Amino acid sequence: MREKILYALGLAGALLLLRNLYVILLQLPDESAQGAIYRIIFFHVPSWFTCFTGFFVAGVSSILYLVKKKPVYDTFAVATVEVGLVFTIIGLITGMIWARIIWGIWWTWDARLTWAFITCLIYAGYLMLRGAIDEATARARYAAVLCIFAFTSVVITFKAIEWWRTQHPGPVLSIRTRGGNMDPAMESMLYLNWLALMLISAVLTAVRMNQEGVLRQVEGLRRQVHASS
Amino acid sequence: MFFRHSLAVAMKDLRSEFRTKESLNAAFAFAAMILVLFSFVVDVGDSEILYSMSGGVLWMTFLFSGALILNRSFAREQPNDCLDALLASPLSGSALWLGKALANFVMLLAVELFALPLFGALYNLTWTRSLGWLAVVLVLGAWGIAVVGTMFSALTVNLRLRELMLPTLIYPMLIPLLMGAIRLTTILISGQPITGDDWIWFRLLVGFDIIFTSLALLLVEVVLLG
């Protein structure tokens, strides 16, 4: 049953993505100032939203782990961080492609970009830290602490365009500008694509959680074998 | 009581450090080495470039040599299971952490006080033009590094590749602090006043110190005791 729900969710995400691609590529017109390349925003911004959501959930889940000490919260945190990190990298790469076309350079060290990169490094460090600890409860505990620390960097990345004068474009969505910056058709497209990415990342997270569960079973079996032999 | 405990831990760490000088000597030598290496990175004849890079050079020096001090902080307690003894004592985990952070803070300041005049002498720069503010920035920066570094020193003490994991984890975490400290240090060493836009960096330093000190005090018991 669980698997079927997962397949259904994945299928829904994939279909929505296909439908979105059709609208993005064939129905929406070019943007007046940027031309065709603006379409990358439909993946760039939703990717960042998805990864921020993932890191936020991972942070909450880490706090819950420290409070309740249930392994499932740790599993949830590592799964969401891994999926979030993938979307961080997608966000960085789509941003770089856009920058190459619009700014003429792949990268610039302004506050938003720098902090996005730092966030990526910190969460990569989180996964490295997990790899360096053998004992499961110590790993979960240390990783949870790091995950809470790491979230500060997500907040800074998100707010960087307000706190510093950055080369990165300012807020365009109406939730932050109170409207007027973006055509409603384009804006709703952006949210729809976020929904598609969220569906897909939910499936990925669930799959990754299954893997962690199996991993824990294998570790338990191995310990049993060691104990009995 | 809490602060007396922390102070006792800090004094213990400092005393054992000043007797053996195992990490301080290494940190001083390493700081000097980095300063020498930087002479190949920058054009040492151009004092304008030197001034504009001074903050960066200095904080990289503090950060790299500081990692040596932070690595030793909890590793020092490993032989003879000293850490277990400390945890079994009436000390609270956060008092232990605060004590160690204080000791690291003092040692980081020592590294700064060593590296700064050396930097000035080696690169022929006048760095004393606004000493008061410079001291404030150095103190705030050192405290930030000590807070995050001590926390992660506790976290990485039992790991394989400890010496590698600590910098990998703390450097990205410290970047907000470093950006502010580097910018302000460059301004102050060049003898300019801190103006309008740059006060945000100052607020950033203070905010970073407050946020991470409270986060660490909250979470350190979890790391140390489970």
Image (spheres, coloured by chain):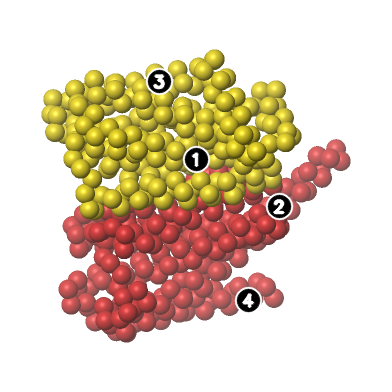
Chain colours: A red, B yellow
Badge 2 density bin: few <14, some 14–19, many ≥20, Cα 10 Å? some
The Cα atoms of the two marked residues, 2 and 1, are separated by 34 Å
**Label 3 chain ID:** B
Amino acid beneath label 2: Arg
Badge 3 and badge 4 in a common chain: no
Badge 1 density bin: few <14, some 14–19, many ≥20, Cα 10 Å? many
**Label 4 chain ID:** A
| Residue that numbered label 2 is attached to | A216
Pair 3/4: label in front: 3
| Residue that numbered label 1 is attached to | B147
Residue B23 point in image, percent of width and height: 49, 21
Badge 2 and badge 1 in a common chain: no
Residue A170 point in image, percent of width and height: 28, 67
Pair 2/1: label in front: 1
Name the quadrant containing residue B74: top right
**Label 2 chain ID:** A
Residue B160 point in image, percent of width and height: 59, 33
| Residue that numbered label 4 is attached to | A5
Amino acid beneath label 1: Val
What residue is rendered at 57% in x and 26% in y? B11
Amino acid beneath label 4: Ile
Identify whether B102 is placed above or below B221: above
| Residue that numbered label 3 is attached to | B28
Q: Is residue B91 left or right of residue A19?
A: right
Q: Earlier in the sequence, mark 3 or mark 1?
A: 3
Pair 2/3: label in front: 3
